[in-house]
Every structure is written in C-alpha cells, then in structure tokens.
Image (cartoon, rainbow, N blue to C red):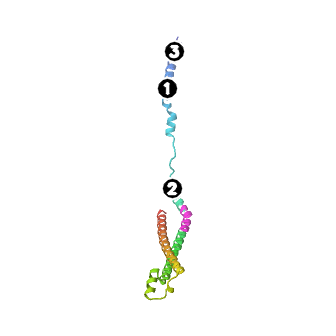
Amino acid sequence: MATASTYSECVTSLRTSLSFLESSVATLGHGVEDFPRLATVLKTVRHYELIPQPTLAAAESSLRDEIGPFVAILLDRADKHLERQARRIETLKARADLNAGRLSHFPSDKDNTTSFSSKSRPKSKVLDGGAALRAKVVRQRKEALKYSVERLELEVLQKERELRVQLDKA
C-alpha cells in the first residue's frame, strides 16, 4: 500500500502541476490574443531619413552647378531682349521726332488758309487734295508711332518687373 499512496501523491502532484500549466496557458492566451494588433502598432516605420550635412551640401552644390549655367543663359537672353527693346524704343522715338520735324515744315489746313490769304499769295500754293491727304496720313502715322512708343515703354517696364520678380524668387 505504500506504493499506492506514493502513486496517489504523484497523481495529485501531477494534477496540481497540470492545473498550474492550464492556468499559465490561459494567462498566456489572454496576454497574446492582442498580439496581431500590437504587431501592427509596434511595427517600426521609417518616415524620415536623416542626411548628413556634407551630403546635403554636396547635393546643393551639384544642383547649383547643374542649374547655374542655364540661369546665366536665361539672364543673358533677358538682358539682350531688354537692350533690343530699348534700341527699338529709341528708334521709334527718333522716327517720331523726324516725322514731327517733317510735319512742322508743312503748315496745317487752318494755317494754309490764313497764312496764304493774309499774305495774298495765289491759291495755287495752297495744298491740293493729294498733299493734304499725305499730310493727314503723316499726322496719323505720327499719332500711331507715339502710341507704339508708349506701348513699348510700358512693355519694357512690365518685362523689367517680371525679371525682378524672377530674380527675387531665384
């Protein structure tokens, strides 16, 4: 019987160990049941990559070296275009002055009748229809040229403003 009591003690010890084991498995089960959610929550995601200062400086220098010549070319083009526009304005002003000088040699229609009649010159000196028409055309061209000069001056000012804005951005 001594063996039976030893066996019974072994069985009770085994049952106690088994209940502890079942309790441990249950505790572990409760602790691990949230594991998939925790895995996604705790998963490390690399959002930002830190770059060392020398690498960043080298990239900036490379970008500057790559873009620099193109910026210089564009600035040269803009300068040449502005110079062309300035020359064009000066040419138009000179033409307008020349036309104004030419027109000043021809008295206007009102001046024709009064000056010629006051000096009692023959009526053949009064501008005939063709000359009067040419004088009128010249006056109209003069007005058109004045308008063109004003418009070109405004365009130059606008281009200068745009260029300043672009240079400020760069």
Residue 150 versus residue 11: which sits nearer the camera?
150
Q: Name the kind of residue labelled 3 in the image.
A: Ser
Instruction: Please report the residue visible at 49 percent of the width from the left and 26 percent of the height from the top.
Output: 26
Residue to which mark 1 is pinned: 26
On whether residue 90 falls in the magenta region, the answer is no
Q: Name the kind of residue labelled 2 in the image.
A: Pro
Residue 128: x %, y % from top left: 52, 82
Residue to which mark 2 is pinned: 52
Q: Which contiguous range is marked in magenta?
A: 62-74
Q: Are marks 2 and 3 in contact (CB under 8 Å)?
A: no
SS assignment at label 2 = loop
Q: Which badge, 2 or 3, is on the more N-terminal residue?
A: 3
SS assignment at label 3 = helix
Q: Which badge, 1 or 3, is on the more N-terminal residue?
A: 3
Q: Do the residues labelled 1 and 2 touch (CB within 8 Å)?
A: no
Residue 117 versus residue 170: which sits nearer the camera?
117
* Residue 96 disc label: none
Instruction: Please report the residue visible at 51 percent of the width from the left and 26 percent of the height from the top.
Output: 25
Q: Name the kind of residue labelled 1 in the image.
A: Ala
What predominant SS class does the magenta segment belong to? helix
Q: Distance between the residues labelled 1 and 3?
A: 27 Å
Q: How far apart are marks 1 and 2 (CA)?
A: 50 Å
Instruction: Please report the residue visible at 45 percent of the width from the left and 83 percent of the height from the top.
Output: 113
Q: How far apart are marks 2 and 3 (CA)?
A: 72 Å
Residue 158: x %, y % from top left: 47, 67
- 33 lies above or below 104: above
- 42 lies above or below 97: above
- 100 lies above or below 21: below
Residue 70 versus residue 137: which sits nearer the camera?
137
Instruction: Tell me if residue 165 can be seen.
Output: yes
Residue to which mark 3 is pinned: 8
